[in-house]
Amino acid sequence: MASESSDEGGNGYEPKILVFACNWCSYAGADLAGVSRLQMPANCRIIRVMCSGRVRPEFVVTALSKGLDGVLVLGCHPGECHYSEGNYFTRRRGLLLKNLLQFVGIEPERFQVRWVSASEGAKFADTVEQVTEQIRALGPNRPQGGMHSTEPGDR
Amino acid sequence: MEDKLQELVVELLGDGAMEYFIGYRQGFEPSHVVPCFVTDKSEADRLIWGPLCLQNLSKYVLQARDLDGKVGLLVKGCDARAIVELVKQHQIERDKIVVVGVPCEGQVDPRKMEQVLGVSMEQVTDVEDAGDEFLVKVGGEVSKLGKEQVLRDKCFYCKHPTSFDYDYTLGEVQPFTIDSESEEYDAVEKLEELPLEERRAYWLKQFERCIRCNACREVCYGCYCKECIFDRTDPRWLDRTPLPRENEIYHLIRAVHLAGRCIDCGECERVCPVNIPLGRLYKKLQKDIAELFDYEAGMEYDTVPPLVDFELDDQDPFL
Ligand code: SF4
Ligand code: SF4
Ligand code: SF4
Ligand code: FES
């Protein structure tokens, strides 16, 4: 991926974003983006999973609560899951989880799901770019003094 | 009703139709009702029924998994939904349970009653159902309380006051009216309408207070996992310390685990020692599941739970 991007958001803030990419489509899409030397912000840490359906809601909840700025789940387009139906479950869960997170006051941009196929290197790069910019604009997830402070005084 | 119940239990125990029966009995204080396990006919006279029989006893039937015979259970209409779900989730076979349905005309929320009366429940010596109101005895005096003042939240929107699936029933519900205009999802909608930051502040304050006693998990019919994710040490999902951050993880994970399975029995909220309005969290999921997937947990045996199912044309905001 591209080298560490510079201080674009001011104050040196660079969001940390966790990306789950399914092995068969989106991870291959990421590869293609890399091979094609597309420019992308370097804020994403990618974890390869065998299917977007593997991403348990617990992963997302824990990542966000522990202070990551955003979570992006990438899977094959509906109808194209390597395991036929995994991403249909992802879709239902994703909807519910998105609503639940909003309900407890977490900005919807911080958890996103997108469908990216193996041939969509450019879409991968665009998605990562878009999501990074949205999250950068929001600022840090739960800044100091919020839930994520571990200072003893905050208990 | 109690006589009928006791006779039935004596009969069923005598026939060997069940190994034991689970109902309610008087606790230490008059206003405190506790679960009662009747293994012998001679104990059946301890069984009671009334508006303080709050517990959802369904979780206890899981004990029957290890028995040769059956377990009998007194079941309110709302609790029956837990039985349906336990069977649906393959936790128990329906024919291991003898369901004795009881017509329920509403249960008392002790917290509301304490507020209305201005005395602690310990001083309440009797609560009797009288149609649209409860007759409440404090000291020697009886006062009348309209049901809308003291009913548990779930009773306002009760869908079937008697179990629709029973082996025996103790009768029909007498019609009564609750003088209230509130709607099922009012509390959830009020929160939904708040600006995001205010919702965040609201839940932050709630989660912060949680002492992680785990009572809400222990009481929940749906939390039957042999090894709960929160008890795992490898990987360790949750720090044992009730830090706000860890509490948030606890509550959000439990919420997603109960998505599509929560039957709105209200037990989690009832047992919480620090009064966290857990019902609102679970009600939100219920509302979404009803709206998005047209599903309500515990209502039918032959529908597929929403999160192990899909439609090709499900809403897709993720393109
Ligand atoms: S989450 Fe609460 S209301 Fe829902 S089934 Fe469990 S105890 Fe009952
Ligand atoms: S919280 Fe989740 S893992 Fe724990 S018992 Fe409940 S359903 Fe099982
Ligand atoms: S019962 Fe209340 S205090 Fe205990 S773990 Fe649940 S929410 Fe926290
Ligand atoms: S394999 Fe890509 S979403 Fe299932």
Image: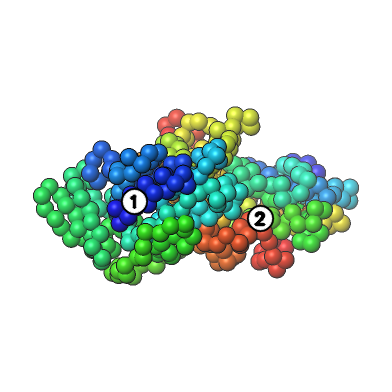
Q: Give the percent coordinates (x, y) of residue A6.
A: 71, 44
Residue A9: assigned label: none
Dot 2: few (<14), some (14–19), or many (≥20) neighbours within 10 Å? few
Locate the N terminus of chain A by quadrant: top right
The residue tagged 2 is B308
Residue A67 visible in the shown view? no
Residue B5 visible in the shown view? yes
Q: Residue at x 31, y 67 (%)?
A: B174
Q: Residue at x 73, y 50 (%)?
A: A52
- Relative placement, left or right, of B141 versus A136 is left
Closer-to-camera residue (B99/B296): B99
The residue tagged 1 is B7
N-terminal-most mark, 2 or 1: 1
Closer-to-camera residue (B217/B141): B141
What secondary structure is found at the residue carrying circle 1? helix
Looking at the rendered structure, whether the residues under marks 2 and 1 are on a common chain is answered as yes
> Gap in Å between the C-alphas at discs 2 and 1?
43 Å
Q: Nearer the viewer, mark 2 or mark 1?
A: 1
Q: Chain of mark 1?
A: B
Q: Give the percent coordinates (x, y) of residue B12.
A: 42, 48
Instruction: Find the residue positioned furthest to the left.
Output: B140
Q: Residue at x 60, y 64 (%)?
A: B293
Instruction: Find the residue positioned furthest to the front.
Output: B15
| Disc 1 within 8 angstroms of ligand 1 (CB) | no
Q: For residue A119, what is the image quadrant?
A: bottom right
Task: Name the residue type under label 2.
Answer: Val
What secondary structure is found at the residue carrying circle 2? helix
